[in-house]
Image (cartoon, helix red, strand yellow):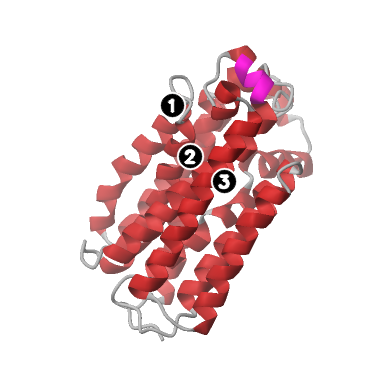
């Protein structure tokens, strides 16, 4: 679609196109872990910092999604599941997509600077991860772990935004490791939707390499390991009935996700959003005084 045609689209339709493109609702997969990381830090999380974390996280996530869409737009155009997305279909121009990603990254940097100029040291690391993950699927079937490591930056950045120091790292490293394996596992599950397309286009994914049944077994193993890391986090830094119950709920949701693996879209978003919420609430409602002084 040309720029002129794009400009002729009614404002309400353009809003819907961009809302679908940005998928802001998927922030529910990352924000709970970012705030859990912030709660594991010292001093206590303030309202101002919480708001700035939200702005920075939204900008960073929009940048990551935009770069993924831009780098993958030719592949998306050849995949029956994704060819109708806004960028490959022409409803959003590549120039507009680049502008949106660049603007979102500037917003993230400004919010990070407003928290503390020291937070800007994380900017190049985040940008490198955002650019690297889409490229990994060109070279390795384990690109899913690249996504996991990218999302694991979220709780680490949340922790640093509050503490502005690298002390008391054991709980946040456990949370980051949990995030890595959890995210890699659900990305493998989601990639089963594109098994045949990935194989045809030469995209490296675990389902394309070893088949969906075997890949789902790997995902289940990653999720089992991630739950063990969650238990380690509880033992290292948390306590109380509510934290234990909520982490148990997260474990039950992992099991339910794999029992519902044939309903990939449902198992991917609602189930994992619920897991993230359970982990956040488990940290927030812990009865052990956290390093940040929360009850």
What percent of the width, then of the height, locates residue 103? 47, 41
| Residue at 45% across, 65% down | 35
Q: Nearer the viewer, mark 1 or mark 2?
A: 1
Q: Earlier in the sequence, mark 2 or mark 3?
A: 2
Q: Quadrant of the C terminus?
A: bottom left
Of 132 and 282, nearer the camera is 282
| Residue at 43% across, 26% down | 136
Find residue 94 and report its image quarter.
top right
Does 202 lie within the magenta span?
A: no
What number of labels is visible? 3
Q: CA distance from mark 1 to mark 3?
A: 22 Å
User: Which mark identifies residue 220?
Assistant: 3
- Residue segment shown in magenta: 195-199
Where is mark 2, residue-wise?
64
Of 43 and 206, nearer the camera is 206
Q: CA distance from mark 2 to mark 3?
A: 26 Å
Q: Quadrant of the N terminus?
A: top right
Q: Nearer the viewer, mark 1 or mark 3?
A: 3
Query: Could one spot residue 92 in this view of the protein?
Result: no
Where is mark 1, residue-wise?
136
Magenta part, dominant SS:
helix
Find residue 28 and report its image quarter.
bottom right
Element on which disc 2 rests? helix
**Label 3 Cα neighbours within 10 Å, binned few <14 / some 14-19 / many ≥20:** many
């Amino acid at each position: 679609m040309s720029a002129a045609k794009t400009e002729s689209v009614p404002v309400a339709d353009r809003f819907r196109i961009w809302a679908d493109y940005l998928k802001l609702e998927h922030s529910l997969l990352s924000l709970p872990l970012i705030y859990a990381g912030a709660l594991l830090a010292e001093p206590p999380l303030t309202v101002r910092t919480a708001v700035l974390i939200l702005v920075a996280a939204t900008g960073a996530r929009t940048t990551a999604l935009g770069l993924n869409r831009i780098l993958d737009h030719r592949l998306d155009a050849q995949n029956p599941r994704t060819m109708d997305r806004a960028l490959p279909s022409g409803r959003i121009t590549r120039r507009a997509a680049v502008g949106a990603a660049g603007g979102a990254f500037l917003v993230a940097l400004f919010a990070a600077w407003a928290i503390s100029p020291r937070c800007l040291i994380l900017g190049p690391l985040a940008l490198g991860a955002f650019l690297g993950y889409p490229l990994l699927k060109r070279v390795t079937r384990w690109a899913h772990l690249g996504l996991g490591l990218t999302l694991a930056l979220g709780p680490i950045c949340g922790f640093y935004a509050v503490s502005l120091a690298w002390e008391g790292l054991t709980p946040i490293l456990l949370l980051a490791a949990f995030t890595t394996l959890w995210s890699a596992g659900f990305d493998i599950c989601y990639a089963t939707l594109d098994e045949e397309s990935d194989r045809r286009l030469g995209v490296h994914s675990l389902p394309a390499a070893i088949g969906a049944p075997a890949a789902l077994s790997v995902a289940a193993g990653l999720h089992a390991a991630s739950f063990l890391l969650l238990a380690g986090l509880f033992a290292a830094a948390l306590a109380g009935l509510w934290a234990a119950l909520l982490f148990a709920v997260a474990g039950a949701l992992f099991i339910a996700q794999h029992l519902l693996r044939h309903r990939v879209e449902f198992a991917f978003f609602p189930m994992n959003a619920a897991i993230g919420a359970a982990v956040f609430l488990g940290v927030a409602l812990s009865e052990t005084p956290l390093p940040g002084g929360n009850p």
